[in-house]
Amino acid sequence: MNKYFSLFGATGSIGDFTLHVIDNIKEGKPDIFLLSGNLQTEKLAILAKKYNPEFLHIPEKKKDELYRLLDDNLKKRINIISSFDEIYEAYHNVNIWEHYIINGVIGTGGMLPSFLSQHFNIKSAIANKESVILSHELFEDLDTSLIYPLDSEQHGIYKILPFIKKEEIENIYITASGGKAYKKTDGEISSLNLDDVVKHPNWKMGKRITVDSSTGVNKAYEYIETQALFNIPKEKIRIVIDQKSLIHAIIQDKKNNYYFTVSTPDMHLPILSFFESIGIYSQIKIAPLSFVDFQVQLTDILSKSYPILGPFINNYDRSLFAGTFLIVLNNRLLDSFFDYKISFSELRDKLCQILQILFQDRDDIYQSLFKNFNKLSFKDKDSYIKINEFLDIMNKIVEKFV
Ligand SMILES: NC(=O)c1ccc[n+]([C@@H]2O[C@H](COP(=O)([O-])OP(=O)(O)OC[C@H]3O[C@@H](n4cnc5c(N)ncnc54)[C@H](OP(=O)(O)O)[C@@H]3O)[C@@H](O)[C@H]2O)c1
């Protein structure tokens, strides 16, 4: 039986890794149902030619530009879609047993594939942590059995969990590399510029997540993602530094056994494992570790390197939508950082200051706006519109602080 894939965020870094894995499948290569992009129309047109999907998904404002870039043959065959109703219609009749969604979108745009997956019961491999956080905070019926986590730490936990009874778990440790700001003095941090911060020492990733690794926002997201995906109480989730990014997750049981997932930092690995979990094998091999590499030192997070992380974790409250707030705030500040309007140290400082205001004035901010918010259901098609309304309100709140 042929398998069909939708790859959301096909033009990004997770998109590149996924297509590289698919290129190296020799038998049972899956068909591509849909590829999506946002701004990179030329890249999406090249991918359309190579992978021949049934649908291309792109924002309305980019539709004509993308159409002009397709050759005549593709123009006749491929449907370019933009609106929610168009994409909803496209999934309405898919056979959910043959279909898989890969979510490699960055930011809250990742909510679209996650919503489609949950609404239509389609299995999805998710790298987009933002949509997991929104699903956790805004929805009442997230079905985690539909999710294969691609984020390396969550993938590490997912791989270990079958070996341990849930009630036996003492702690779950997720690792952070430290990013560019780790162990730097205030003076060194203030001289970091955009080009410095977008180069991650270990991982090849998109620019925004690389900056998030340096501010600690990425770990704050993963802290919530871990609670959401595995239903683990927040008190049991710890963060430690492994500067080489070789250890992705550790589970400690009540007898103090420790289970580690260790590998070369390479995002091909979780994607390969996902494909293998559904019986599709790619020829890509991950570089082995040598014992020389494997001299890791695990240290506790340093509040000086990640000033937002401690306060965020200590104050985190799902019912206050603190993760959603952080996503919206961080996206807004990252836009300013990438436009050279604020420096890296200003980005860090503003994140800290504004989060502090949120936690101090939580009642004033939320009581009036979200007090009567009823959790959404994935089964209700209109929930997708309600998420966007919610995000609009959150954007307005954030704008007041920024
Ligand atoms: N890269 C990694 O190694 C890695 C590892 C773990 C987790 N993740 C997570 O995976 C997600 C993707 O990260 P990435 O590094 O692959 O990002 P990226 O390289 O920046 O790619 C993001 C993709 O999302 C698309 N996109 C951006 N805004 C969009 C919107 N509003 N609506 C729809 N599509 C949109 C982009 O389209 P255009 O390029 O056409 O504009 C691109 O295809 C993030 O949530 C990240 O935290 C990534």
Image: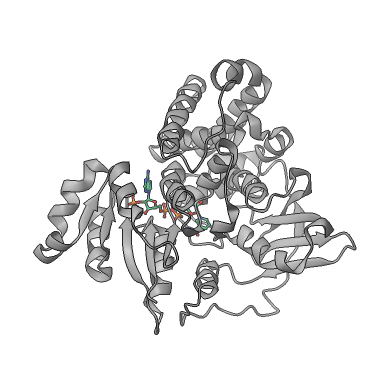
Tell me if residue 269 comes above or below residue 91 in the rendering.
below
- For the view shown, which residue lies furthest in the left direction? 72
Residue 382 position by quadrant: top left
Camera-side residue of 175 and 138? 138
Figure quadrant of residue 173: bottom right
What residue is rendered at 59% in x and 39% in y?
Answer: 140
Left-right relation of 326 to 55:
right
**Seen in the image, is 179 located left or right of residue 284?**
right
Q: Is residue 352 placed above or below 75 in the rendered structure? A: above
105 relative to 286, above or below: above
Residue at (84% x, 61% y) in the render: 253
The N terminus: image quadrant: bottom left
Given residues 95 and 179, the one toward you in this image is 95
The reply to whether residue 84 is visible in this rendering is yes
Q: Taking 50 as reference, is 163 left or right?
A: right
- Figure coloring: one colour
Report the residue at 28% width, 49% height from top.
58
Please say whether residue 197 is visible from this viewpoint. Answer: no
From the viewer's side, name the closer residue of 82 and 130. 82
Question: Where does the image place residue 214, in percent across and percent down from the top left?
Answer: 58, 47
User: x and y percent of residue 237 in the render?
Assistant: 74, 49
Total marks shown come to 0
Q: Compared to 52, does 282 lie above or below?
A: below
Q: Position of residue 313 (x, y in %)?
A: 70, 39
| Residue 71 position within the rendered picture, expressed as x and y whole percent measured from the top left | 12, 63
On the rendered structure, is 398 left or right of 41? right
Give the camera-side residue of 331 and 318.
318
